[in-house]
Image: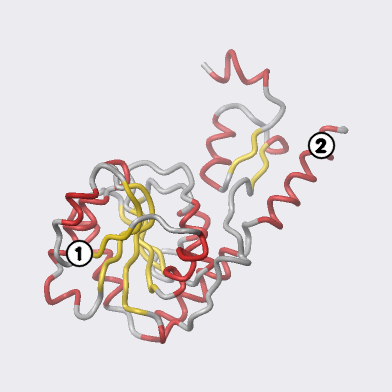
Amino acid sequence: YFRMFLRRKYFAAWVPGKSGKRLAKQLGFGVKRVFVGMYGGNPEVFKASVSFEERSKRFIFVGQFIERKGVLELAEAFSQLGDASQDWSLLMVGSGPLEAQLRSYSLVEVRPFAQPEQIAALLADSRCLVLPSREEHWGLVVHEAALSGCQLVLSHAVGAGPDLLEHGVNGFGFKQVTVGEIAEALKCVIAQNDAAYRRGSECSVERAKAYGPARWADEFTRILDSLEH
C-alpha cells in the first residue's frame, strides 16, 4: 500500500540504522534517498567511565515493564540460572504494568526510571545490557549502553542489533523470546574470561562511535544538500 499510494508523497527516509535502511528500500526508496543515523545517545553523558574490571558483575535492563519488552521472561531466566549465575545480579530499571510481578522475583532488583545522568552511571557500572524485546524498531538504550562499554544481549527483534552487536564478541543475540534462550545467552556472558570481557567492552564503544549527535548533524546536512539538487 505504501509503495503504491504513499511513496510519492515523501522525498526520502531518515532511519536509525541498517534495519531501517533495509525497510526503507523495501518501501520503495532508492539508495540515495535513505539517510541513516536518526537516533543516538549523547556521548557526553553516556561513556565508559568505569574500567571493565571494576564494574559490578551485573546485567541491566532499562525500559518499560511491558509484555513487548520480554521482561518477565528475563526475570524468570535469571532466576532459573541458580548456581550458574555465580555472583552476578540483575537490575531492572523502569516502570509499567508488570512491575509488581517483577518485584516478586527475590533475585531481581527493580528500580524506577531515573534521570539520564543516573542511568548513565548505572550503565557504566554494569557489564551487560539485556534487551529481550519481541519488537524494537531501534532501541536507543542499546546505543547508550554500547557508549558506556557494556556488552549486549539482544533478541533478534531489536533493530539496533545489526549495527551495534557483534555476536560472540561484544555480546550475544537470540531468536526467540523464551526463558530458555535468554538463559543460554546470559550463561554465555557469565562464562567469558576477563580478556573476552575487555575485548567486548572495547568493541561496544568502537561500534557506538558510528552514531550520535555528530552523525545526526552530518546526515541532516546531507538531507538539506540533497534537497537543493
User: Looking at the rendering, which quadrant does residue 169 occupy?
Assistant: bottom left
Q: Earlier in the sequence, mark 1 or mark 2?
A: 1
Three-letter amino acid code of the residue under disc 2:
Ser
Mark 2 residue element: helix
- Residue 207 at x, y percent in the picture: 56, 65
Mark 1 residue element: helix
Q: Nearer the viewer, residue 186 or 168?
A: 186
* Above or below 105: residue 216: above
Three-letter amino acid code of the residue under disc 1:
Phe
Instruction: Identify the residue position indicated by label 2 in the image.
Output: 226
On the rendered image, what quadrant is the C terminus found in?
top right
How far apart, in angstroms, are the residues tagged by discs 1 and 2?
A: 49 Å
Residue shown at 53% from the left, 56% from the top: 163
Instruction: Identify the residue position indicated by label 1 in the image.
Output: 78
- Residue 79 at x, y percent in the picture: 15, 64
> How many residues crowd around disc 2 within 10 Å: few (fewer than 14), some, or many (20 or more)?
few
Residue shown at 34% from the left, 56% from the top: 112
